[in-house]
Image (cartoon, rainbow, N blue to C red):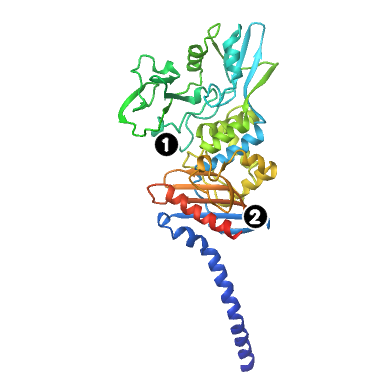
Amino acid sequence: MAKSIRTRINKSVSYFPILFVAVLFLMSACTAPKKVLMAEAPLQGAHIGIAVFNENTHQWVDRYQSDKYFTPASNTKIISCYLGMKYLSDSLPGWRLAETADSIFLLPLGDPSFLHPDFSFQPIVSLIAHTQKQVVLCTPTQPDAFASFGKGWSWDDFAEDYQPERARFNIYGNVLTVAKAKEGYTVKPSLLVKGTTQPSIQTIWSRDRYQNRFYATTKVNTDATETQQQIPFITDPELTLAKQLLEDTLHPTLPIAIQHGFDFANSRIVKTVATDSLLKIMMNRSDNFFAEQMLLMTSEKLLGTIDEDKIIDTLLKTDFSFYPQKPQWADGSGLSRFNLMTPENYVALLQKMESEYSLERIKGIFAQGGKGSLSGYYKNIPGVLYAKTGTLGNRIAFSGYIITHKGTHLTFSVLIENHLSPRTYPVRHAVENYLTSIMKKY
């Protein structure tokens, strides 16, 4: 009996070095993100989630709290990008048009490009301006089910340029733009400031909370490089404002009419701008307005109506049923504080996008490291990176693709919240250091 016990003890002792090494390996794997990220001063006390997957070997490179929920901010736009790529075809289905002998009936479908300064191709503008027929703007037969602000948006940001209202009919990006010109300043749409003191780019402009009354504040714009200001205006689902703006801008032959309902046996879709061109701007500029309209237009395309809750529920049960963890999804842009996602979910979404569409197409849409919106980051890295940033009150997010100099293809997501850094760039540089260390290794 004693010999048997000693034998078992000796065996357990002989196993101890192996077990000790294994434990050390697991501990080092688990603490690697802490060593690289949490040790950085800007991230002291922050919550961090990491998921990095090697697509060459089909193995995880690193995971830390990868199944935990974080507020993803503008990483939500990756979802909107996928929806645009899948459902809005090569060009946006901007309008439904029906024509009779003397009238043209137009039902807007949520297209954000109409009279937007980023897009010169304006087929409906040309039609309204040149037709001799009666132009009739139509509201949908079935009422839409969405609000101008998304759930969980900050109501007191109503006058901020990053929070234009969402709408079925969109014009000028749903913002008033005050811009420097060769002589003085230009204002579009000028109808909204008629009778108002001429604006100055040196003075910060704002708007009344409940009406389209724009005014100069007492605040002075100290950014000498800023050449324009944009202030969202209140949209009108009944299209009264749309009628006024179109008549003031395009001067149609006949006054524009408004009709409730659109029920025509022979109608057609009018396509507008190239979908990928809008998605590229959306992802590089992190344009909230474009992202929101991608979600609404997807609803119109799939459901025949714009119903935000219904389309989100439908998509979670179909296109996005693959998520490892069930998300909480509230809007298309990431402005909502109600959005909750995990790093693993983003890796799975990015993998789905790449499996359905070529990586070359995705590269043409996502921001590239060292260029554009990422020009201050990932300049001298051992590889190339394509990703989407996200920023929202003490939270940052960063998800995308990496091709290292060794040819390794990585898909990653890093979500951080509750950091106390007064500025985001120290946090982003900490993430850059971490991802660069991964690239050097693989």
Q: Identify the amino acid type marked 1.
A: Ser
Q: State the residue position of label 2.
A: 408
Residue 350: percent from the left, percent from the top?
Answer: 62, 46
Residue 292: percent from the left, percent from the top?
Answer: 53, 33
Mark 1 or mark 2: whose residue is earlier in sequence:
1
Q: State the residue position of label 1.
A: 154
Relative to 195, 409 lies left or right = right
Residue 252: percent from the left, percent from the top?
Answer: 54, 9
Near-viewer residue (367 or 38):
367
Say above or below: 57 vs 315: below
Relative to 431, 273 lies left or right = right
Say above or below: 54 vs 143: below
Residue 319: percent from the left, percent from the top?
Answer: 65, 41
Q: Secondary structure at mark 1?
A: loop
Residue at 69 percent of width and 45 percent of height: 355
Say above or below: 426 vs 177: below
Q: Is residue 114 visible?
A: yes
Please rate how many residues cluster around mark 1, counting C-alpha atoms within 10 Å: few if below 14, some from 14 to 19, many from 20.
few
Q: Quadrant of the C terminus?
A: bottom right
Mark count:
2
Q: Give the alpha-carbon distance from disc 1 to disc 2, as whole Å.
A: 41 Å
Q: Secondary structure at mark 2?
A: loop
Q: Identify the amino acid type marked 2.
A: Thr
Q: Select label 1 or label 2 by which is in front.
A: 2
Q: Is residue 67 visible?
A: no
Q: For residue 216, which quarter of the picture?
A: top left
